[in-house]
Amino acid sequence: MNTKLMTIFTRTPLHVGCGSSVGAVDQPVARERHTRFPVIPGSAIKGVLADLWLDWSDPQNPKRDDKDGVKLLGAESADVAHAGSLLIGEGKLLAFPVRSAKHCFAWITCPLALKRFAADAHKSLSAVDVTNDSAVAPQCLKIDGNVVFEEYPLASDETVPQDIIDEFKNLSDEPTWKDEIQNRLSIVSDELFAYFAENACEIANHNRIDDASGVVANGALFSQENVPSETMFYAVFNSRSSNDFEKLSAKLEAEKNLLQFGADMTTGLGWCSVVMK
């Protein structure tokens, strides 16, 4: 079995939803049940990739009739239905952007996310141990030996191990990521990472004004949760043939490695830089 990672770096806020909610947010994002980390379901990734092979010669009835697309992602026709040769995992959260009192913002990750990534990528990374009131951070984020993320001051006596910086730097060619990761990547505890990932997403309030009355139309006022731009996810891809990854990479390059995931494409949400690594 051959394995590769697809890195997904959000260039705009992202909303891959999980339906309506009775909570404070009407339309929350999909999350892992046990960690509450935002997640991009594998089915959502597969659907976006399948659309790359759609034939739009008939806009009313687009079809995926390209043989490579059918082989990689499967056929839906009842006559020739079969599974695709690519096994696509969910998009797991690796680095999350938060406000920083110094240097504008930081990317945070945690020991759990690092261990997951190391296992999925078959890498060996330095072990890092942090407490709930501390962080491992670069010097440029520190103020008198502390960092301040959102409203939380954290003691910081250590810097991020260089092997983690080097591994992260290679995940994307986006200048925002590649040029800044060594100055912004920090490691916090699993608990604090989970807290930020759940509570530091964007909440966008939507409404639609009734032209006749000049007030909000009935049922048209709702709130939507979005994962912020500059968030890094990765998904594990498996296949028995390395040639499958070559075909997929070529298709992504033809799209300039830019895909749209989730809702609200026409209002600019969900645009992501993707790379097979």
Image (cartoon, rainbow, N blue to C red):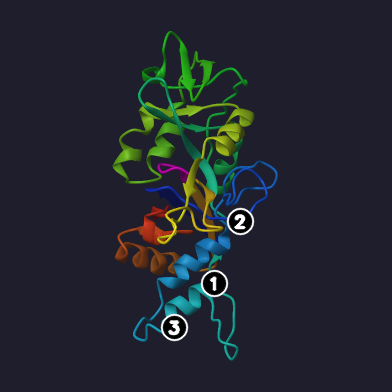
- Residue at 49%, 77% (x, y): give it: 71
Q: Which contiguous range is marked in magenta? A: 227-232
What's the distance in space between the residues labelled 2 and 1, CA to CA? 27 Å
**Is 186 covered by the magenta stretch?**
no
Q: Secondary structure at mark 1?
A: loop
Find disc 1 in the rendering and name its residue.
Answer: 85
The answer to whether residue 250 is above or below residue 195 is below
The answer to whether residue 1 is above or below residue 166 is below
Quadrant assignment for the N terminus = bottom right
| Residue nearest the viewer, comparing 96 with 187 | 96
Find disc 2 in the rendering and name its residue.
Answer: 18
Q: Provide the major secondary structure of the magenta segment.
A: loop
- Disc number placed over residue 69 in the picture, else none: none
Find disc 3 in the rendering and name its residue.
Answer: 63
Residue 9 position, x and y percent, is: 41, 48
- Residue at 45%, 42% (x, y): give it: 228
